[in-house]
Image (tube, rainbow, N blue to C red):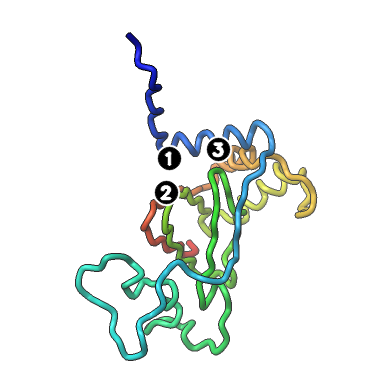
Amino acid sequence: KASSAAAAPAALSPLEIETLFWRAAADKPFSIEYANDMPGSGFAPLPAAGRRWREEALANVGESAWNMRGVSRAKGSLLRFMKEEIPGVTSPMVYVAMLFSWFAWHVEDHELHSLNYLHMGAGKTWYGVPRDAGQAFEEVIRVHGYGGEVNPLGESSCFNTLVSAAFHDNISLVRILSSSDDAFLYKPL
């Protein structure tokens, strides 16, 4: 007698999910929900003035000097000398996303490093272009994405085509997968 309960499908690997994303992006446009640039943090408030960070084994990164609420003002950071708070530079921002969400390729403000922490959820794939390949990558975007013109308000071709063109033109791309509870520092190459 066959069981009436269906077997649970096997979990997909991050590479399989990434493949599904590129396939879906090449097929037709689709909508996703994504919230970005929300001032705040999923980390606990910083310790009171004068209290030192715990140095023994920590329960989570929020109890360490890597707490995003204090990294920019920590000893050794030049950002600690800035008097004004700049959301996303001297204080953290929160991003909430769903499956297949993506954020445009960009250079960080003032070419600063980017420090990210994935609190929960499935892994996140990051792509980077080394600085010495930046102009060539922008040319691929201009030619293959905008038909020779750079018009940010115009329609661009599917991003899958752009990435394929970048590989075809031998432009170096870096791919990194971060997982839940990973801190990720992106330094302009």
Q: CA distance from mark 2 to mark 1?
A: 8 Å
Q: Position of residue 70 (x, y in %)?
A: 42, 78
Q: Is residue 89 above or below residue 161?
A: below
Residues under labels 3 and 1: Cα distance?
10 Å
Which badge, 3 or 2, comes first in the chain's sequence? 3
Q: Position of residue 102 (x, y in %)?
A: 58, 49
Query: Residue, x 64% and y 34% (percent of image)?
Result: 26
Q: Residues within 10 Å of mark 3 (few under 14, many from 20)?
A: some
Indicate which disc, 2 or 1, sits on the residue closer to the N terminus. 1
Q: Which mark is residue 177?
A: 2
Q: Earlier in the sequence, mark 3 or mark 1?
A: 1
Location of mark 1 (residue): 14
Q: Residue furthest left?
A: 56
Amino acid bearing label 3: Phe
Residue at point 39%, 72% (across, down): 67
Please tell me which residue lies in front, 77 or 169: 77
Q: Which residue is mark 3?
A: 21
Above or below, 1 against 186 in this view is above
Residue at image coords 66%, 46%:
140
Residue type at mark 1 is Pro
Instruction: Indicate left or right for 153 with 64 as reference.
Output: right
Label 3 and label 2: CA atoms lie apart by 15 Å
Q: Is residue 53 left or right of residue 184?
A: left
Q: Mark 3 and mark 2 in contact? Answer it, CB < 8 Å.
A: no
- Can you give x and y, in whole percent of width and height, for residue 168 in the image? 58, 37
